[in-house]
Amino acid sequence: MTEKLQVLILCTANSARSQMGEGLLRNMAGDRFDVYSAGSEPSVVNPYAVRVMAEEGIDISRHTSKNLTIYLEKEFDYVITVCDYAARNCPHFPGKAVRIHWSLVDPADAGHSDEECMKSFRNARDRLKNHLQEWAKAV
């Protein structure tokens, strides 16, 4: 049996984009990848991220926001940043980690109404899903 590739998905707060990415990649290719997520300034998992992932049948309600420092000694095959701040401030990870960056707008910066927030989070989720599907096919 082939060893799973180790993947870390990073954003600033580890509250939305990286959490959704972790859930999506585990769901679509968990047999090929061990997936983790973290942030440079962790907070809490955004309830809108939980809601839009539930629409896809993926439960991230038990995920927690983690500081990337807990992974500094772990070797990853891929480190994927999903926000520009995380890409600029991502520390060096040991080993052969290939760095990938997808610039995604923070969905939490959308409007204030429930409808605007859901639309923004769905857009981020769907963009992440497309990126991950294309990337996973190529790996």
Image (cartoon, rainbow, N blue to C red):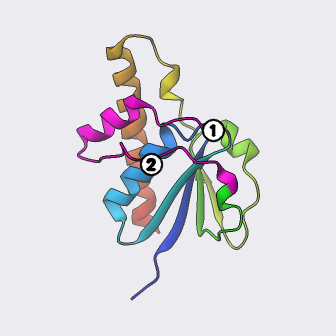
81 sits left or right of 2 in the view: right
Q: Secondary structure at mark 2?
A: helix
Q: Amino acid at mark 2?
A: Gly
Task: In the rendered view, tell whether residue 109 sits above or below residue 7.
Answer: above
Measured as percent of width and height from the top left, residue 91 is found at 76, 54
Distance between mark 1 and mark 2 Cα atoms? 13 Å
| Image spot of residue 71 (x, y percent) | 65, 61
Q: Is residue 91 left or right of residue 13?
A: right
Q: Which mark is residue 59?
A: none
Which residue occupies 35% across, 31% down? 122
Give, as a three-letter code, the residue at label 1.
Thr
Say whether residue 118 is magenta: no
Q: Which residue is mark 1?
A: 12
Q: Which residue is mark 2?
A: 21
Picture quadrant of residue 137: bottom left
Can residue 44 be found in the magenta stretch?
Answer: yes
Under circle 1, the secondary element is loop
Assess whether mark 2 and mark 1 are in contact (beta carbons under 8 angstroms).
no
Q: Residues within 10 Å of mark 1 (few under 14, many from 20)?
A: many
The range drawn in magenta is: 41-69
In the image, residue 42 sits, relative to residue 106, either above or below, namely: below
Please name whichever residue, 47 or 98, is drawn nearer the observer in this view of the structure. 47
Choose top left, top right, bottom left or bottom right for residue 51.
top left
